[in-house]
Image (tube, rainbow, N blue to C red):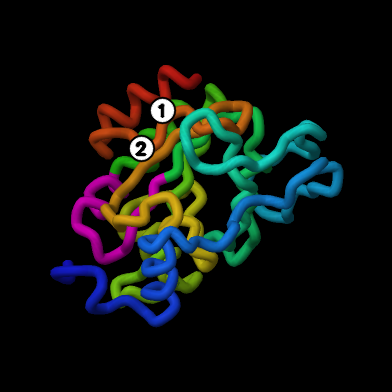
Amino acid sequence: MKPTPIHHKSPLAAALGLLALSACVPNLTSPKGAVSDWVPPENSWESVETVPADLKAEGFREGEVAPDIRLLDQNGDEVSLWQFYGDVVAIDLSTMWCGPCQGLAKEVDHVWEAYRDQGFVYITMLPENRSGEVPTTADLNDWSSLHGISAPILSDSVGYAYEIEPQQAWPRVLVIGRDMRIAVNPVIPAEDAAIRSVIEDAL
């Protein structure tokens, strides 16, 4: 594990981190107004066909409707957060170089399988690979193989993680309710037992 993230951060990642720390963050939320134009992306994950017409992105604070995050997964396909409308969603914000993130990753599929039949999805979102760069599809597949994750793993090429966690204290876990409202952000501590407890409350 590298001693500090800033030494190996790519120019893009460093710039996004500085933007987040200075509160000059780009608007990463979905467009305002009706979502009648929303269409599910083509990927291998379960998906609703439509979302409520009055669903509007608000932000990442508790009680707000989460933005429609759209990123590429380990299969190279676009994934939309809103395609999981009606499910409880946990998002694990981790980096590939982070020791605690690696420990948490080993529990992801156990948690997903425990609650999947109740309408639960566990998403891992990685803003940085081991060199501090935006993860490639190969990186995502390495993470999947190393930790036995079959749930969605997304490359955070946009920088949502730096908006949600400007201090870059990884891992950070948030849980989103079936209506896409943030239920808990962050889960403290970001450990298996606490995550399961929050998920069970949201189901």
The amino acid sitting under disc 1 is Ala
Image quadrant in which you'd find residue 28 = bottom right
Say whether residue 68 is left or right of residue 13: right
Furthest residue toward bottom: 11
Q: In the rendering, at what x and y percent does residue 193 appear?
A: 26, 28
Which-is-in-front pick, marks 1 and 2? 2
Q: Earlier in the sequence, mark 1 or mark 2?
A: 1
Span shown in magenta: 92-106
Q: Which mark is on residue 145?
A: none
Position of the N terminus, as image quadrant, is bottom left
Question: Which disc, if any, is residue 186?
Answer: 2
Determine which of the numbered discs, if any, sits on residue 114 in the image: 1
Is residue 158 depicted above or below 36 in this figure? below
The residue shown at (51%, 35%) is 89
Q: Residue at x 63, y 62 (%)?
A: 77
Type of amino acid at the residue the image marks with label 2 = Pro
The foreground one among 59 and 104 is 59
Residue 146 place in picture, x, y as percent: 31, 59
